[in-house]
Image (cartoon, grey):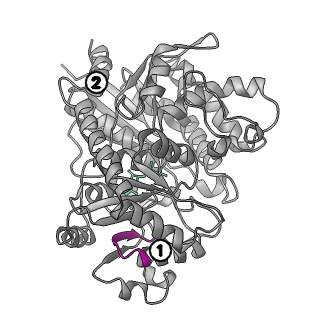
Amino acid sequence: MPKPHVAVLPSPGLGHVTPLLELAKRLVTQFDLHVTVLVVTSTIPSPALSQLLHSPTLPADLDVVELPPVDAAALVTDEMQLLTQLAIMVEHSLNASLKSVLLQIGTPKALIIDIFCTQAFDICKPLSIPVYSFFTASVALMNFSLYLPTMDREIDGEFVDLPEPVAVPGCTPIRTADLLDQVKDRNNDEYMWYLHHVGRLPEAAGIFLNSWEGIEPVSIQSLTEHPFYRGIPIPEIFPVGPLIKQVECTAEMDAELINWLDEQPSKSVLFVALGSGGTFTSDQMTELAWGLELSEQRFVLVARFPSDRSASAAYFNAGSGGEEDGPARYLPEGFVERTKGRGVVVASWAPQIAVLGHVATGGFLSHCGWNSTLESVSSGVPMIAWPLYAEQRMNATILEEEVGVAVKVAAAAAVVGREEIERVVRLVMEGEKGKEMREKARLLKESAAEALSVGGGGSWASLAKVAERWKK
Ligand code: UDP
């Protein structure tokens, strides 16, 4: 008897592929399903993505099928916003090949899509394939997104100009300054794409959330207790998080870094990384390096090639650098030598899960992407929150004000100065506040492990409920 077969379709970008791949792995290893992960590919190479999708450790019943690549150069330009680029590439890819690929792989029992792949609703309907949605960001953003079509109908003008924080029913109000980039300019294509995709969320057969009650109790309760938004029913929700990737160190560089961490005292190292795409300007990189040096703390710095054009410059080609001549070139003169022994500089990419899980790591300066957030709290590591793009400002505020595991960098000017960086680094690594945040993060680590525990955890049970449905 062949195993029940389902397919998973992430949007491009590591922050999307990683959690959907993790969901696929769990469906295979914990629930004995056959899963095909369909990957939207383009002509932009991403070494980090390629390593993830071709890992020798993927389980046997998990197939990765790459959709024919779309010609990124012909479709998108650097001037387009990140989401516009992503949505256009996905639309072309799915129109060109999703139907035929679904038929080729044998019409799966269900398709689980990422938020920016909603075209799949139209393609799967005639094939009678139920489509589930997987929301890769916070539940707070999910609530806001369900409310967005109502806001779009009822509010004139820009949301960022509203006099009060946005009061999403049942949720903590969102300060207008924290709203995600995509809704800051309603005349921009990015807004149109975001509204279009989230507006279709109610069509899903169910929605998976990469979160759990331990970190977002209010937002999750709001969804379960108010299953209607203005008369529109919300699909059944399944909190299955935190789904984060497993430790994997392959490169020689990684081993060197882990060996160095092995020699450092417990909880003494600050890890600095800005997700798959986050990029500082040259001036900001200089101030960051000086701030780290002045703080006199141990550190691992992922020093990506700076960009004065975009804070998400590396998003589509994560891990491919531009740092060939070495980061010393764009760090302050003598920085690498002066901090030798106390700090390690890595170009472009580090094995984040392994670093966060290492006993020597005591803090994480992060752009607060949702995956990085889940990875940090799952390792019990407090954060310095330095949001850069998308919904990261919202995440930073939740982490500082509701969860209590982060402190935000005070960004009073376009470039955050070295003194402020020194202040927050010392605060988290050696201050009382750091201790308090570390304790809260430790409790969240326990709560995350409990939620995922096979047989009894809430997130495991959520996934089991759907998996059993597909097995019938
Ligand atoms: N990541 C990594 N090494 C790095 C930087 C990032 O492995 O040097 C991984 C990180 O572990 C996370 C993902 O890239 O799983 C970034 O996802 P996130 O949602 O935090 O941010 P995004 O890249 O979507 O902005």
Front residue of 311/66: it is: 311
Amino acid type, callout 1: Gly
Mark 2 falls on what kind of element?
helix
- Quadrant of the drawing holding the C terminus: top left
Q: Position of residue 260 (x, y in %)?
A: 22, 73
Mark 1 falls on what kind of element?
helix
Q: Position of residue 460 (x, y in %)?
A: 26, 26
User: Is residue 344 rendered magenta in the image?
Assistant: no
Furthest residue to the front?
A: 432
Question: Which tag, 2 or 1, sits closer to the chain's start?
Answer: 1
The residue lying at 60 percent from left, 21 percent from top is 169
Left/right placement of residue 214 relative to residue 99 reads: left
Q: Is residue 11 visible?
A: no
Indicate the quadrant where residue 168 lies. top right
Q: Where does the magenta region start and end?
A: 294-304
Up-down: is 338 above or below 425?
Answer: below
Label 2 sits on residue: 458
Label 1 sits on residue: 291
Q: Quadrant of ligand 1?
A: bottom left
Q: Nearer the viewer, mark 2 or mark 1?
A: 1
Number of other residues with Cα within 10 Å of mark 2, as a class: few under 14, some 14 to 19, many 20 or more: many
The residue lying at 37 percent from left, 41 percent from top is 19
Number of other residues with Cα within 10 Å of mark 1, as a class: few under 14, some 14 to 19, many 20 or more: many
Front residue of 159/294: it is: 294
